[in-house]
Every structure is written in structure tokens, then in C-alpha cells.
Image (cartoon, helix red, strand yellow):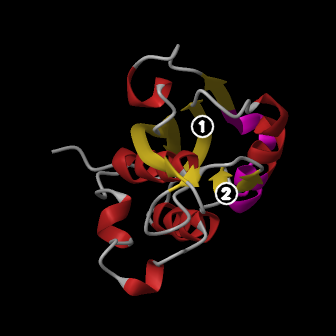
Amino acid sequence: MNIKIGNGYDIHRLVVDRPLILGGVKIDHELGLLGHSDADVLTHAIMDAMLGALSLGDIGHYFPPTDSQWAGADSLVLLGKVHQLIQERGWQINNIDSVVVAERPKLKPHLQNMRTQLSSVLELEPEQVSIKATTNEKLGPIGREEGIAAHAVVLLASSIPTCIY
């Protein structure tokens, strides 16, 4: 079996009059994330990790903010498209480990729903999707509640032999 690992990161600014969506879950909060799509930093970090594992670039390459068709896009739909890209190349997700960094709101009550949403799109068991939440201890722009960030690591596996040069 062949394995590859990818690392992803995303950050978006918090603003008024936008929904807060993380891991495909709309969370009640007075601020939401600003972005061309729904600005779901967790899903974006996971997609970048998936793409990075196969050296396929980043989500900006596939869903550029200059393309109006992606304005307000549901990131779970985009995740499905990235998942299809890796499957077409003979790879499957073994597991995902991620962390969301936010001062507020408290995310613990939403983590299981996020795992369920993401694992459903990716055709995984929820146990294959780890999501942790932490604060930035009031340090920096995240600590000042100016934004929310997410980090993700994805392990891909394939039974297709790779070419060695």
C-alpha cells in the first residue's frame, strides 16, 4: 500500500452580516467568516491538505475567487469535487486530523455534527475524521476575535503501485 500525507491551513476574517459555517455546520454567532465562498475555514483546510498530498496545488487553483460561479459556494460541494479528483487518481482518504482555532464561539457542542457532515461527503466513517477546537489564548488576530483559522492533515492511501525513477 502507498501512502501520502497532506497539510492544509486556512484563515478568514470575522465580520458582521455573514453566517458562521464550520465543517459544513451553520453555527449561531453574531459574526461570520468573510470570503468568496461560504468561507468555511475547516473545510478549506481539509481540501488543501487533500490536494497537497497529491501535489495538485490548492483550492484557489480549482475554485478561484475571481470566478463568479464560486461566489457564495457551499464548501461541502467543493469538498465533494476535490474528493472526486483524488479518487480519480486512485487514492482514498485513510484519516483526517484537524483543529479549528477560535476564541468564540465555543465549538465543542458542534464538533460531532461537523464530523458527520464531512465524513458523509467524503464517504468515511465519522471516526476517520478528527476535529479539535482550541483558542489562541487571546493572542494575535485570532485572539482578538478578528478571524478564525483551521489546520488539517490528511493521510491518503492507494493500492496502485507508484513509479519509481
**Callout 1: SS:** strand
Q: Please state which of residues 19 and 99 is positioned toward the viewer in this rendering.
A: 19
Q: Which residues are magenta?
A: 117-130
Q: Does the CB distance between marks 1 and 2 fall below 8 Å?
A: yes
Residue beneath disc 1 = 96
Instruction: Specify which label sits upstream in the sequence, 1 or 2.
Output: 1
In this view, 99 is above or below 157 = above
In this view, 22 is above or below 123 = above
Q: Is residue 165 left or right of residue 161?
A: left
Residue 52 appears in view: yes
Seen at 66% across and 50% down, the residue is: 23
**Callout 2: SS:** loop
Q: Please state which of residues 94 and 146 is positioned toward the viewer in this rendering.
A: 146
Q: Is residue 108 magenta?
A: no
How far apart in space, not on screen, are marks 1 and 2 (Cα)? 11 Å
Residue 136 is situated, as x and y percent measured from the top left of the image, at 50, 19
